[in-house]
Image (cartoon, rainbow, N blue to C red):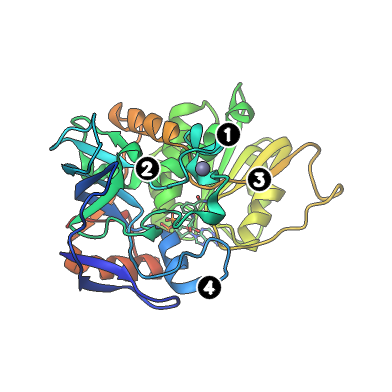
Amino acid sequence: MKAIVFEDFKTFPTLKDVEKPIPGPGEVLLKVAGAGACHSDVAVYNEFEEGTPGAVPPPFVLGHENSGWAEDLGPGVSGIKKGDAYLVYGPIGCGRCRACSRGQDTYCENAATNPYLGVGLGRDGGMAEYVTVPARNLVPLGDADPIAAAPLSDAGLTPYHAIKNSLPNLAGGGRYALVIGLGGLGQIGVQILKALTGATVIATDMKPEAMAKAEAAGAITVGGGEGQVERIREITGGKGVDAAFDFVGASSTVKVAAQSMARMGRCTIVGIAGGTFEWSFFTNPYEATLTNTYWGTIEDLHEVVDMYRAGQIMPEVERYSIDDGLEAYRKLQAGELSGRAVVVP
Ligand code: NAD
Ligand code: ZN
């Protein structure tokens, strides 16, 4: 079968023929419906090298945002129906520690000795006709469209988890949220904030068309450049935002997020650009929190699917055949995409 393979660090992926996988004990073979291209993949193949925190040694098939139809069940699998559509929870921990027991494989206590981080991250992912995944990582999609659902695995789950952790900051009247970076994650982030909170959502991106989309989803947008923080503060009546979500993570965006905070606000860095910001008693609004998040829990993913099925989250996708999958990554890297690129093999 054809697959998009990450073959070596600092090397653009290749489209090649690989063996169709066979589901092992406890695993399910999925016929892939959709596999989303996430910006983290660009870091995986372009920026990371051996020893970089989060680096996963090649080779493996890319694709950690996957959906598909159960085609075959490995030994010992029950409760999964052949032909049914499922969304894949990507992280794979040891399955036994406290973190994994609460469905939070992302923070597995045995990560150091696990063979991979997850599906499409060290272990073959969904940018192929077929993928095998542990049965415990499947979330049923029912009759919802599995192709548009694929980005929910990460571009939906990651902002959902970050926003859920910030809900106490956004509950109550007169609250403000800031979303920086309106790509795959940021656009869904705006939708989730609108659906789950009554907060005024302020959003920003370098691309006018990305801001137009966020406006259509109910956000107030503020362009970049000189005076950006002042304009954000002005919208909030001077007090600043109660929660900020930085889906870029560069020094410049972390600075905007941190300087826009209200007292007791919560600033979450999600983007992995690796930027830094000086945070001290005197720069920090009183009791403001600066934190980060990584992906989410499988329980969160069930909730994201509930929101999708209720029409509260509508990922906008650009479909690519597997033959055009490398073009999807090229465009993602160049910032030329307008919706989440989903490879439909
Ligand atoms: P994307 O390429 O779809 O979107 C990025 C958006 O940010 C684009 O619209 C771009 O125009 C905008 N942008 C870039 N630089 C900007 C700047 N300086 N100011 C304002 N806007 C800017 O990327 P994505 O797939 O949505 O991923 C976003 C980030 O989140 C990436 O860094 C990715 O690696 C990271 N990520 C983190 C997690 C996690 O668990 N923490 C999970 C998935 C992705
Ligand atoms: Zn674990």
| Residue behind mark 1 | 165
Q: Amino acid at mark 3?
A: Thr
* Residue placed furthest toward the right: 282
| Residue behind mark 4 | 50
Give the position of the N terminus as an image quadrant: bottom left
| Cα distance in 3D space between marks 2 and 1 | 19 Å
| Residue behind mark 3 | 291
Q: Quadrant of residue 285?
A: top right
Q: Which of the two labelled residues, at mark 1 and mark 3, occupies the earlier sequence position?
A: 1
On the image, the x and y values in percent for residue 258 come to 69, 49
Number of other residues with Cα within 10 Å of mark 2, as a class: few under 14, some 14 to 19, many 20 or more: many
Number of other residues with Cα within 10 Å of mark 4, as a class: few under 14, some 14 to 19, many 20 or more: few
On the image, the x and y values in percent for residue 260 come to 68, 46
* 140 is higher (above) or lower (below) than 28: above
Mark in front: 3 vs 4: 4
Q: Quadrant of residue 262?
A: top right
| Residue behind mark 2 | 89
Q: Secondary structure at mark 4?
A: loop
Q: Which of the two labelled residues, at mark 2 and mark 4, occupies the earlier sequence position?
A: 4
Please report the residue visible at 30 percent of the width from the left and 39 percent of the height from the top.
135
- Residues 40 and 101: in front is 101
Q: Which of the two labelled residues, at mark 2 and mark 3, occupies the earlier sequence position?
A: 2
Number of other residues with Cα within 10 Å of mark 3, as a class: few under 14, some 14 to 19, many 20 or more: few
Decide if ligand 1 comes within 8 Å of the CB at mark 4.
no
- Residues 55 and 42: in front is 55
Please report the residue visible at 46 percent of the width from the left and 64 percent of the height from the top.
56
Q: Secondary structure at mark 2?
A: loop
Mark in front: 2 vs 3: 2
Mark 1–mark 3 CB contact (< 8 Å): yes
Q: Which of the two labelled residues, at mark 3 and mark 4, occupies the earlier sequence position?
A: 4
Q: Amino acid at mark 2?
A: Tyr
